[in-house]
Image (spheres, rainbow, N blue to C red):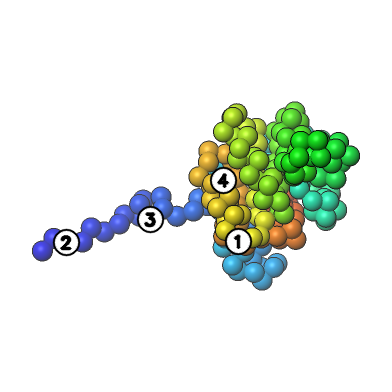
Amino acid sequence: MARPVKRSAVTRRASAPYISPLAEKIIRTIEEETQDQQFARSLHFSPTALTHIKRTIAAGGTIVVDTQLMEADFNIKLLEGTNAQIKCFIDDDEVVKLAQIRRTTRAEIAVDIALSLPGPKLLVIGSAPAALNRILMRRKMEPLSDVCVLAAPSGFATIVQLKEKLRDSDMAYIVARGKMGGVSQTTHLLNTILKAIQEEKQQEQ
């Protein structure tokens, strides 16, 4: 009888979600502060996501969020001492007008405007599946190498599928897999990520 083949440690690691000390700290903080173990464990990081976010902050890039509520609840102090900025285009007059003319959603127009901004960008999706779908469609047409996507909207089949498509792409991403997420959770996650990056930088100085 043939002996069963044992999976090596390397194989086990390869099939597990990517994790780094900084990502692990962020996940642990989310779990402790929210007491939402399911949400914390749903978080998956691409290998380059946190490096991209650090570069975005250092280079004075832009964080673009998909709701004004998220912009209002963002801890702006986390960007002090940098030239980075946070923006939300969803209710801009130009976005509303173009959405009507093109007969599409404001979320899609807002993504197009966000992607036209110079420099590295972090696009944060906490509410609009259409925004995430538009990002994925644009990726089919262009590299988007200067973009990282944080996607944590809640929802059922459609949004779950879009999150998985993002994970299967070659983009830098942070995703709350499955049905987990929502605007408040996404905002908390964004603040936690930037705070962890800020603390790491302070420790290195």
Q: Position of residue 63 (x, y in %)?
A: 75, 42
Q: Earlier in the sequence, mark 4 or mark 1?
A: 1
Residue at figure coordinates x 65%, y 32% from the top left = 146
Dot 4 alpha-carbon crowd within 10 angstroms: few under 14, some 14 to 19, many 20 or more: many
Say which element carries label 4: helix
Residue carrying label 2: 3
Q: Earlier in the sequence, mark 3 or mark 2?
A: 2
Q: Is residue 199 visible?
A: no
Depth-wise, is mark 2 or mark 1 nearer the camera? 1
Identity, as a three-letter code, of the amino acid under mark 2:
Arg
Say which element carries label 1: loop
Q: Quadrant of residue 127?
A: bottom right
Dot 3 alpha-carbon crowd within 10 angstroms: few under 14, some 14 to 19, many 20 or more: few
Say which element carries label 2: loop
Say which element carries label 3: helix
Residue carrying label 4: 166
How far apart marks 2 and 1 lie (CA) works out to 43 Å
Is residue 16 found left or right of 138 in the rendered image?
left
How far apart marks 4 and 3 lie (CA) works out to 23 Å
Residue carrying label 3: 12
Depth-wise, is mark 4 or mark 1 nearer the camera? 1
Is residue 63 found left or right of 142 in the rendered image?
right
Looking at the picture, tell me which residue is in the foreground, 125 or 33: 125
Residue carrying label 1: 156
Looking at the picture, tell me which residue is in the foreground, 27 or 154: 154
How far apart marks 2 and 4 lie (CA) works out to 39 Å
Depth-wise, is mark 2 or mark 4 nearer the camera? 4
Q: Is residue 113 above or below residue 185?
A: above
Residue at figure coordinates x 65%, y 55% from the top left = 152
Q: Is residue 138 above or below residue 167?
A: above
